[in-house]
Image: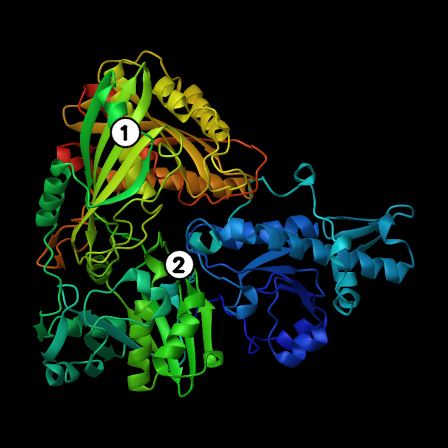
């Protein structure tokens, strides 16, 4: 069973609560405290901080851990304000409960959304411990200081550890907000330092901590087979034959929800595809039995998509130059182009890609009458609770969801259809069910990064970018809205920076399910935009860096006070830092080139310079210099890991990853046909962080978008070949 479980059944819970301090932040934003007595009576402590009589400080991370390091970084925020000795701290995943508010991992929001509240939690706990000491010693609160889990009375030198004060602190009333003082950044002793990930030791020795490792007493094992053509319905199957196989307990058809699932609706619905469930004594027996399964499918509701045909249709739309709908239009675009010194016109296309996270989908669901218990590595456990209650027709209070660490998510674990599949199976067989998807299941039933198609046009006068056009050909299920991440979101650059902009969109039919994929939309648009900026600079005979900085300008905040908007000073700073570190402008041997990319994504200003060499069609990405302004650094080690991981992920995706669809079915089935980057192919990644004094923004996604244009611009500078399609294998290149 996963070790990440905290319930009233835990051993020693009663004794532990007798001397514990529990602090919690309500979903409304107010801080509340539950005394040890109240906590013991309720049987549940929805707390961020617990201090036991041995001095161990347990800090709970409210958001799911899928590799972004929040089970370390979020407790660090609390520990900093608490003035806790980090050696005393144990980090754990919080239970899923309304008291914690929005418990999800996505959009690089875990740290920024919790920043203020977790600082208050830590500072409030510190204040209560100090008040307990002041009352016990009969001294003024103002004479007390804290450090390393110790309260000190400065005039006398008297000290008390937090474990000595916690019992009295837990019985005190909540201090007034005016008495709770947050630290200045200059006083931080923990934040900004390198801290080892709390799960590192467990991961290194292969300890079972992931969703795929979860177990429950008396559980059975299941495999669930769905129509290869997305949206098809199982009409019949050789169920009696399957039931007779060794290890098989049962086999049956589940009606599910016909048609291709729409990611945009999954937050508010319990949807899963129709299919055949095989229940067995172990996973091996279930997987072996499905090889003998014969199913008659009804394809009338299934997708008929063909990715080559979709790409061809998109190309015809782009060639037409006419969009159905204006998304953004400012200035006098036609005049800017008519009077320009030079114009450029280019089409950029990107294929469907899969999330391909290392841990396939695996969940445990136990339906016991009116009660349900779930163990899932979901990025959205908060959505599971209500949706599964609706699915089974039970009270939401009877649903317990345990957060279990995920082996990668990148947006794939934002949807929870495996949970609903397992719930339906468990309800049918009357036992806890461990449902395990195979790698092939994961590849076949993903929510893919949408295939994306842009026609970009630029106008340059006097060496300056004066006009910008973008025609988007976007897939759509309903002929009214683009599929998830298939279109365009209004970006600050260049749309809010240059004077003459026209963004248009035309939709075409596509039923292949799409969803958020690391840095949604940014990941494809950045490639097109930043590659095209380099094209314009080259045609104008201007250094790319110079041209880009001039285009960005010096406006400052595009939208004052909105941390999500472009800050031109921050943008210029990271561009200058990355290019300086890379030695921009230095002479390189023949066949070698530097390339630049910049993008604002998820409030992170990131610039990257790649150095590549090209020999024939073989590309070696030697180094990537990355400069990041993501606000206040929480865990420097974790931040560097996220930024470096984004670069590696970006190189992997742009190299040869492509999802092909034929008659509504995905062709690629495993890593042999959908290759991941190997270690010898990975570049050296040099990370520099810039502190501009702003609050933290996310770091899991913003470093990926600039990578592809930086590498492709470097390839052009190395060999003169302009790449306008991803993956680069489409244009005959191989990363070696």
728 up-or-down from 590: above or below: below
The structure residue drawn at horizontal position 71% and vertical position 72%, both measured from the top left corner, is 35
Please tell me which residue is depicted at 63% across the width and 79% down the height of the picture.
Answer: 42
Mark 2 neighbour class, 10 Å CA radius: few under 14, some 14 to 19, many 20 or more:
many
Quarter holding the N terminus is: bottom left
Picture coordinates of residue 411 (x, y %)?
Answer: 35, 54
Residue 114: x, y in percent?
55, 53
Quick one: quadrant of the C terminus? top left
- Tally of marks: 2
Q: Judge left or right: residue 195 versus residue 451.
A: right
x then y, percent, for residue 238? 9, 81
Q: Is residue 184 left or right of residue 509?
A: right
User: Does residue 364 sit above or below 84 in this rendering?
Assistant: below
**Which residue occupies 31% across, 30% down?**
530
Numbered label attached to residue 127: none
Mark found first going from the N terminus, 2 or 1:
1
Q: Which residue is mark 1?
A: 333
How was the colour assigned to the protein in this rendering?
rainbow
Instruction: From the viewer's side, name the closer residue of 451 and 327.
Output: 327
Q: Secondary structure at mark 1?
A: helix
Q: Residues within 10 Å of mark 1 (few under 14, many from 20)?
A: some
Residue 387 seen in the figure:
yes
Toward which corner of the image does residue 667 lie, by quadrant?
bottom left
Q: Residue 431's x, y, as percent?
A: 34, 84
Q: Residue 448 or 280: which is nearer the viewer?
A: 448
Residue depth check, mark 2 versus mark 1: number of the one nearer the observer: 1
Q: Alpha-carbon distance for marks 2 and 1?
A: 48 Å
| Residue bearing mark 2 | 406
Along the viewing direction, whichever of 467 and 399 lies nearer the viewer:
467
Can see residue 50? no
Secondary structure under badge 2? loop
């Amino acid at each position: 069973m996963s070790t990440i479980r905290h319930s009233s059944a835990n051993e020693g819970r009663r004794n532990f609560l007798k001397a514990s301090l529990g602090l919690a932040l309500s979903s409304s934003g107010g801080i509340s405290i539950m005394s040890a007595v109240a906590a013991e009576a309720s049987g549940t402590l929805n707390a961020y901080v617990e201090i036991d009589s041995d001095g161990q400080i347990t800090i709970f991370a409210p958001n799911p851990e899928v590799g972004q390091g929040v089970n370390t970084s979020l407790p660090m925020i609390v520990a900093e304000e608490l003035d806790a000795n980090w050696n005393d701290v144990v980090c754990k995943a919080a239970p899923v409960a309304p008291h914690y508010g929005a418990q999800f991992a996505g959009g690089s929001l875990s740290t920024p959304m919790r920043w203020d509240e977790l600082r208050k939690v830590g500072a409030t706990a510190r204040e209560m411990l100090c008040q307990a000491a002041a009352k016990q010693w009969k001294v003024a609160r103002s004479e007390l200081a804290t450090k390393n889990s110790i309260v000190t009375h400065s005039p006398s030198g008297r000290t008390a550890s937090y474990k000595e004060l916690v019992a009295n602190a837990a019985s005190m009333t909540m201090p007034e907000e005016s008495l709770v003082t947050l630290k200045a950044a200059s006083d931080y002793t923990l934040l900004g330092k390198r801290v080892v990930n709390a799960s590192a030791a467990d991961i290194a020795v292969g300890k079972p901590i992931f969703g795929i490792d979860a177990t429950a007493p008396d559980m059975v094992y299941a495999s669930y087979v769905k129509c290869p053509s997305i949206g098809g319905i199982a009409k019949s199957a050789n169920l009696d034959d399957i039931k007779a196989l060794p290890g098989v307990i049962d086999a049956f058809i589940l009606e599910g929800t016909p048609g291709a699932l729409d990611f945009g609706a999954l937050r508010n619905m319990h949807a899963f595809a129709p299919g055949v469930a095989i229940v067995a004594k172990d996973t091996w027996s279930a997987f072996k039995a499905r090889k003998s399964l014969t199913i008659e499918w009804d394809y009338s509701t299934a997708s008929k998509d063909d990715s080559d045909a979709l790409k061809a249709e998109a190309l015809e739309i782009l060639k037409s130059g006419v969009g159905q709908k204006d998304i953004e239009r400012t200035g006098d675009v036609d005049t800017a182009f008519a009077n320009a010194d030079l114009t450029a016109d280019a089409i950029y296309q990107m294929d469907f890609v899969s999330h391909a996270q290392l841990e396939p989908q695996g969940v445990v669901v136990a339906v016991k009458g009116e009660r349900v218990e779930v163990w899932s590595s979901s990025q959205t456990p908060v959505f599971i609770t209500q949706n599964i209650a609706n699915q089974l027709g039970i009270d939401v209070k009877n649903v317990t969801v345990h957060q279990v660490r995920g082996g990668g998510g990148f947006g794939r674990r934002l949807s929870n259809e495996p949970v609903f599949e397992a719930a339906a199976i468990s309800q049918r067989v009357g036992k806890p069910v461990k449902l395990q998807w195979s790698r092939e299941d994961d590849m076949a039933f993903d929510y893919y990064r949408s295939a994306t198609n842009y026609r970009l046009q630029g106008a340059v006068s006097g060496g300056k970018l004066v006009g910008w056009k973008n025609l988007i050909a976007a897939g759509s299920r309903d002929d009214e809205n683009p599929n998830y991440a298939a279109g365009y979101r209004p970006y600050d650059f260049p749309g809010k920076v240059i004077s003459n902009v026209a963004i248009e969109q035309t939709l075409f039919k596509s039923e292949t399910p799409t969803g958020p994929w690391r840095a949604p939309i940014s990941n494809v648009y950045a490639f097109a935009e930043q590659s095209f900026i380099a094209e314009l600079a080259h045609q104008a005979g201007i250094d790319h860096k110079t041209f880009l900085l001039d285009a960005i300008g010096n406006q400052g905040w595009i939208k004052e006070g909105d941390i999500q908007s472009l800050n031109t000073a921050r943008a210029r700073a990271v561009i200058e830092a990355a290019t300086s570190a890379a030695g921009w402008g230095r002479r390189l041997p023949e066949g070698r080139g530097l390339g630049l990319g910049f993008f604002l994504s998820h409030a992170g200003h990131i610039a990257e310079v790649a150095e590549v060499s090209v020999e024939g069609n073989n590309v070696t990405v030697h180094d990537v210099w990355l400069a990041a302004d993501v606000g206040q650094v929480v865990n420097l080690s974790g931040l560097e890991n996220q930024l470096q991981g984004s670069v590696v992920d970006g190189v992997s995706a742009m190299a040869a990853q492509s999802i092909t669809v034929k008659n509504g079915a995905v062709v690629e089935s495993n890593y042999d046909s959908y290759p991941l980057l190997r270690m010898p192919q990975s570049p050296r990644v040099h990370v520099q962080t810039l502190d501009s004094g702003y609050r933290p923004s996310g770091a899991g996604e913003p470093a990926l978008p600039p990578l592809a244009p930086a590498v492709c611009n470097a390839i052009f500078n190395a060999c003169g070949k302009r790449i306008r399609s991803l993956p680069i294998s489409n244009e005959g290149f191989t990363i070696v």
